Image (spheres, rainbow, N blue to C red):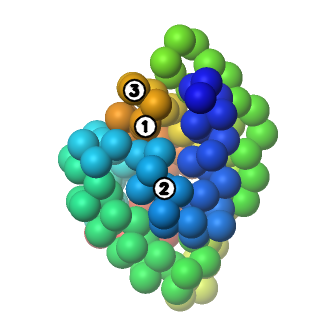
Amino acid sequence: MHAIEIAKTYIQAAQTGDQATLGRVISPDVVWHQPGHNQFSGTHRGMAAVGQMLGQMMAVSNGTFAITRAHHYMANGDWVAVSIEFAGERDGLTLQQAGVDLLHIVDGKIAEVRLFSSDPAQEDAFWGQ
């Protein structure tokens, strides 16, 4: 499967909560770089740690956090950049902004994820310390 197809499969699975597909396309040894200065920021290593972080994000946002749109998929060898929009709500706060997901595909699986936010201060305020 081409890198862009893997990225599209990942985004669709993330949008629909398809855990089985996520487990199939993300490496168990994934290195995930979460941006900002909030409780989820930093580098998370391994699918178990990433899954725990994503579960906590869903809990904090009462299940509202989502990738609401994926615009463009751009490849450079085994790297894919995806232009996205994401949103969520919690305790009267709204998170809504554009971002970029940068995915490194190795042996048909996502081995590294770097996320970029267009409004890091808004995201930090939303997730909190």
> Of the numbered discs in the image, which one, if any, rests on residue 26?
none
- Above or below — where is 59 with respect to 84? below
Q: Secondary structure at mark 3?
A: loop
Q: Amino acid at mark 3?
A: Asp
Q: Looking at this rendering, what residue extends furthest in the top direction?
A: 77
What is the CA distance from the residue labelled 3 to the residue labelled 1?
8 Å
Q: Which residue is mark 1?
A: 110
Q: Amino acid at mark 1?
A: Ile
Residue under the point 21% across and 47% down = 45
Marked residue nearer the N-terminal end (2 or 1): 2
CB under 8 Å between discs 2 and 3: no
Q: Is residue 15 visible?
A: yes
Q: Which residue is mark 3?
A: 107
Name the one closer to the observer, 36 or 26: 26
Mark 1 neighbour class, 10 Å CA radius: few under 14, some 14 to 19, many 20 or more: many
Name the one closer to the observer, 22 or 79: 22
Residue under the point 43% across and 82% down = 59
Side of 47 relative to 109 (left or right):
left
What is the CA distance from the residue labelled 2 to the residue labelled 1?
10 Å
Residue 113 falls in which quadrant of the image?
top left
Q: Is residue 98 visible?
A: no
- Above or below — where is 33 with respect to 103? below
- Location of the C terminus by quadrant is bottom left
Q: Secondary structure at mark 2?
A: helix
Residue 69, image x and y in percent?
75, 52
Q: Which residue is mark 2?
A: 22
Residue under the point 70% across and 30% down = 73
- Location of the N terminus by quadrant is top right
Q: Amino acid at mark 2?
A: Leu
Mark 2 neighbour class, 10 Å CA radius: few under 14, some 14 to 19, many 20 or more: many
